[in-house]
C-alpha cells in the first residue's frame, strides 16, 4: 500500500505541475516489490535483506532505470552498500526530508518511525548537519507506533489506530517539538494533517515530489 501511495503521489505531482494530458506525458516507472524479513520491530536478518534488495537494485539498473528510490525508510540505513552496487544514483529519503525541514526553519523535530529507522539512525546525521534536533518517542509509545504499522501491513487500520498515533504525536509536541515526521511509508496512510492541528511532515509526499522533479529533468 505504501509503494502504491508513493507511486500515486508521483502521478499527482505530474498532473498538478507538468500539464499532463496524455498517458505519454507521465514518466516510465518500474516497481520492484521485494518482500523482506521484518524491519519494523528489529532487523531480522540483515544479510538476507541486503541480498534481496541488492538483486532488485541490480535488475532495475539492468532494465534501464535512470535512478532508484526505495519506498521504505528503514531499509535506507543500508543505502551506502546498495549504492556501491550500481552506477545509477539511488536517491535517499533522509537528505531530501532534511532539506525540506531546514527550508521550513524547524529546529526541533519529532519522529514517528519503525524501530529500525530510529535505532539505525537513518535521519540523524542529515538533521544534525543542519542543526536540527531529533526527538524520539519513549519506549511505550514506540511499541504503539510499531503495532500500528504492522496493523497497516495487515489491512487492519481503523480510527482507533489513528487516535493512538495522534496521541503519540501530541506527546512529542507537548515535549517541545515544532513538527512531527511521519518517517515510515505506512504512517501517512494512517495519520494525515487533517487529523490534528500540529504540523506533520509527510515524508512520502516530500520523497514523491523530489522523485517527480528529478525524473522530469532526465
Image (cartoon, helix red, strand yellow):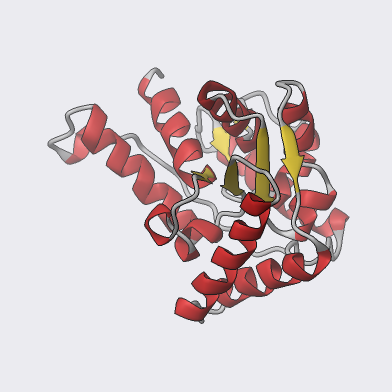
Quadrant, the C terminus: top left
Identity of the residue drawn at 60% across and 58% down: 169
Q: Where does residue 173 sit, x and y in percent of width and height? A: 62, 50
- Seen in the image, is 47 located left or right of residue 41? right
Residue beneath the point at 75% across and 65% down: 142
Q: Nearer the viewer, residue 132 or 157?
A: 132
Taking the spot 72% from the left edge, 49% from the top edge, the residue there is 75
Does residue 153 appear left or right of residue 107 in this picture?
Answer: left
Query: Where is residue 47, by image quadrant?
Result: bottom right
Does residue 134 appear in this view? yes
When the figure is inspected, residue 131 is found, relative to residue 158, above or below; the finding is: above
- Residue 125, compared with residue 41, is above or below; it is above
Residue at the image position 64 percent from the left and 64 percent from the top: 35
Give the x, y percent position of residue 107. 66, 29
Which of the 4 image quarters holds residue 14? Answer: top left
Q: Position of residue 164 (x, y in %)?
A: 58, 72
Looking at the picture, does residue 106 appear above or below residue 23? above
Amino acid at each position: 500500500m505504501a509503494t502504491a501511495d508513493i507511486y500515486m503521489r508521483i502521478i499527482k505531482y505530474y498532473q498538478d505541475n507538468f500539464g499532463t494530458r496524455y498517458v505519454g506525458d507521465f514518466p516510465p516507472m518500474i516497481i520492484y516489490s521485494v518482500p523482506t524479513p521484518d524491519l519494523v520491530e528489529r532487523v531480522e536478518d540483515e544479510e538476507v535483506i541486503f541480498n534481496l534488495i541488492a538483486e532488485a537494485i541490480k535488475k532495475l539498473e539492468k532494465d534501464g532505470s535512470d535512478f532508484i528510490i526505495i519506498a521504505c525508510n528503514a531499509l535506507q540505513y543500508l543505502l551506502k552498500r546498495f549504492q556501491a552496487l550500481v552506477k545509477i544514483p539511488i536517491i535517499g529519503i533522509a537528505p531530501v526530508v532534511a532539506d525540506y525541514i531546514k527550508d521550513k526553519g524547524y529546529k526541533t523535530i519529532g519522529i514517528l518511525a519503525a524501530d529500525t529507522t530510529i535505532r539505525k539512525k537513518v535521519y540523524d546525521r542529515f538533521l544534525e548537519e543542519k542543526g536540527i534536533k531529533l526527538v524520539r518517542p519513549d519506549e511505550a509509545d514506540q511499541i504503539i507506533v510499531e503495532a500500528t504499522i504492522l496493523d497497516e501491513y495487515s489491512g487492519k487500520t481503523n480510527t482507533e489506530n489513528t487516535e493512538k498515533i495522534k496521541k503519540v504525536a501530541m506527546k512529542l509536541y507537548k515535549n517541545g517539538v515544532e513538527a512531527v515526521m511521519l518517517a515510515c511509508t505506512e504512517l501517512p496512510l494512517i495519520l494525515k494533517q487533517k487529523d490534528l492541528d500540529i504540523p506533520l511532515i509527510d515524508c512520502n509526499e516530500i520523497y514523491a515530489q523530489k522523485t517527480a522533479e528529478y525524473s522530469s529533468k532526465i
